[in-house]
Amino acid sequence: MQIIDGKEVAASLRREIAAEVAAWVAGGNRTPHLVAILVGNDGASQTYVGHKEKCCGEVGFRSTVLRLPEETSEETLLGEIARLNADPQVDGFIVQLPLPKHISEQRVIEAIDPKKDVDGFHPVNTGRMISGLPSYLPATPDGILELLKYYGIETAGRHCVVIGRSNIVGRPIANLLSQKGWDCTVTLCHSRTKDLKKVVRGGDIVIAALGKAEFVTADMVKDGAVVVDVGITRVPSDKTKSGWKLLGDVKFDEVAPKCSYITPVPGGVGPMTIISLMKNTLKAARREVYK
């Protein structure tokens, strides 16, 4: 059994991106500029945006964070999005999710110019991805692909079982792994899947992205499987200074001995998501997707 070290892979890719940015700027081009909009005071969102700011500095990007109060109206937020869409000094931007309940996330996503949608959530970019056209890939699915590639994990002809059908992880990773070049046979499972344990046991590669702590147990995984744990849930703990710990969707201690490869939580898929955002921002600066 080998641990898939997301921190190691992220560090390697961060160095590659930094070198590409340095060469891009040395060639007389403007420094890539990423903007994040943060509405409200959600602790996890603030931490995540902070990590993004730090990573921008490490790869040589210009970074701006627009912090708006919780009570910001939907129309005010849409006005900020329109301003960023029109700003030629901004290559890409994200609106950090989740948003306050009075704001429609879908309306916000659709208001972002697809050319600057470096989260890859806009329906235009989703459509391009499904069609196999150049696009900004959603961060977590792209991060999973990078992990598989870095560790040389064979995908062609193998059966991949994805648990969870969200538009952010489950559906896009299922689509991407079925495309030419990855060539998996993919089964997408969800809450209505019959005999779920049997289906998951058939997977050579299992991607757990349903958001339920330690849902995947040893009896659901066959010997030698590759297991990618996307889930992250905070649970109370009296053994940590913070008073909580992070658990994935996979019961790691009992599943890991059966695996050929497995991602830990934390330190697996998580570090890759910000790297994917950096990749998309550099693509936007270079006009690689939209010429």
Image (cartoon, helix red, strand yellow):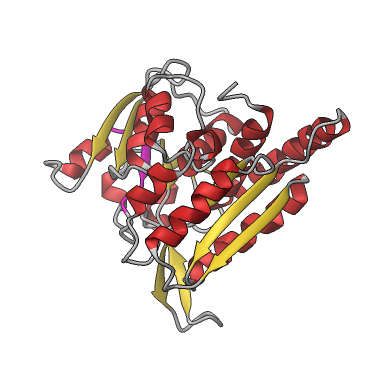
Instruction: Provide residue 24's location: percent of width, then percent of height.
Output: 80, 31
Question: Toward the viewer: 54 or 91?
Answer: 91
Q: Residue at x 44, y 54 (%)?
A: 78
Q: Quadrant of the C terminus?
A: top right
Residue 128 in the figure: left or right of residue 68: left
Instruction: Provide residue 49's location: percent of width, then percent of height.
Output: 58, 60
Q: Is residue 182 above or below residue 281?
A: above
| Image quarter of residue 278 | top right
Q: Is residue 188 above or below residue 98?
A: above
Residue 49 in the figure: left or right of residue 69: right
Q: Is residue 229 above or below residue 290?
A: below
Q: Residue at x 44, y 24 (%)?
A: 155
Camera sees residue 264: no
Question: Toward the viewer: 125 or 246?
Answer: 125
Q: Residue at x 42, y 24 (%)?
A: 128
Residue 51 in the figure: left or right of residue 210: right
Total marks drawn? 0
Asked whether 204 falls inside the magenta stretch, the response is yes
User: Which region shows up in magenta?
Assistant: 202-210
Instruction: Provide residue 37's location: percent of width, then percent of height.
Output: 54, 58
Instruction: Provide residue 25's location: percent of width, then percent of height.
Output: 83, 35
| Image quarter of residue 50 | bottom right
Camera sees residue 165: yes
Question: Toward the viewer: 150 or 40?
Answer: 40
Question: Toward the viewer: 97 or 184?
Answer: 97
